[in-house]
Image (spheres, rainbow, N blue to C red):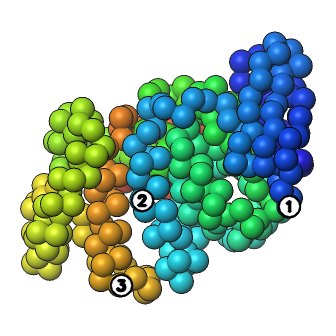
Amino acid sequence: MYFYNYLCCPKCQKDLDISVEKKSNHTIETGKLTCVGCGRVYPITGHIPRFVESDNYATSFGFQWERFNQIRYDSYTKSNLIRNTILRRSGWEKDHFNGKLLLECGCGAGHDTEALLNMGAKVLSFDFSSSVEQAWKQNSQYKNLLIVQADIANLPIKKEMFDIVFCHRVIQHTPNPKKSFYSIAARVKKDGDMFLHSYSTRLKSMLHYKYLLRPITKRMSLETIYKLLDRFGPCLYKLVGLAIKYRLKFFRKIIPFENMDSLVEKHNLTLSDEEKYQFSFMVTFDALTPKYDKPNSYRTIRNWFKDAGFDHIVVRRKKPVVVVGTRCV
């Protein structure tokens, strides 16, 4: 019940009354939330408050994470890859998360969620897609977690309440990244921190097979793309492996498939050969299928932070773009 104090009506921002139908362990399994202002009713199903329709622009992520729901979890690969990526990109120590109230923007299947919880954060997480189902399934044992299905541009979450707002690999997949940024930035409390990751507009980033193919693939059904990758993937996977081996960077970028073997080996992930291939398949599918892919420059994002009242702004990376800042007003 603790996290429900941070929810509000996404339409009028008023408080919500909770009606519990079924409680399971430490969470509400089914029930409803009723706005005290406008009277709108939002259901709680499967332990998840729902503020959007299930069919939306993020359908590809629900499709994706239903099929690849475990393979990126540190607990599954018996590694600290996700945790260490978060720490490296943010520049924060593990203790920076301990005991902090954190808003995770776009949880996907919940692999970052697991890492954040294991570093001691109290996490309120949301996603627009049905991937929230998998995120809850994989993380339901944690008591310091609430997962919500919600729209990043119309959040059912109170403003200026969170010690950390964390947005990793998400904002470029929204219809209006700038609007999405200001929406989540408003949830950072004074002296709170924000972490934002975005794809980059640098030429090296844009010269990639996905930007050549996306005008076609984003109009195709997810099932069709999945079948095409399933048919041609094994051959393309091997070709990319050869391009990497012989350092043929150009071909590496234009062959429409990923090969994550070097990353798996570098971080000693406990994946079988088939799982290595599935990992690469998943990353390829993720590149080709989102409805929106709108990268931004680090200068643009840095200016967003300034305009939103942040200081101590640090551009951690330029490709991809990673910016962190502390809100001063």
Image quadrant where one finds the C terminus: top right
Left or right position of 91 against 72: right
- Tell me the amino acid under the disc marked 1: Asn
Task: Identify residue for label 3.
Answer: 272
Between 323 and 68, the one lying in front of the other is 68
SS of the residue at dot 3? loop
Give the tally of numbered discs: 3
- What amino acid is at disc 3? Ser
User: Could you say which disc has been placed on residue 67 in the image?
Assistant: 2
Asked whether 2 or 82 is in front, the reply is 2
Residue 89 appears left or right of 294: right
Q: Are marks 1 and 2 in contact (CB under 8 Å)?
A: no
Quarter occupied by residue 39? top right
Label 2 SS: helix
The picture places residue 269, in percent across and down from the top left corner, at: 44, 83
- What's the amino acid at mark 2? Arg
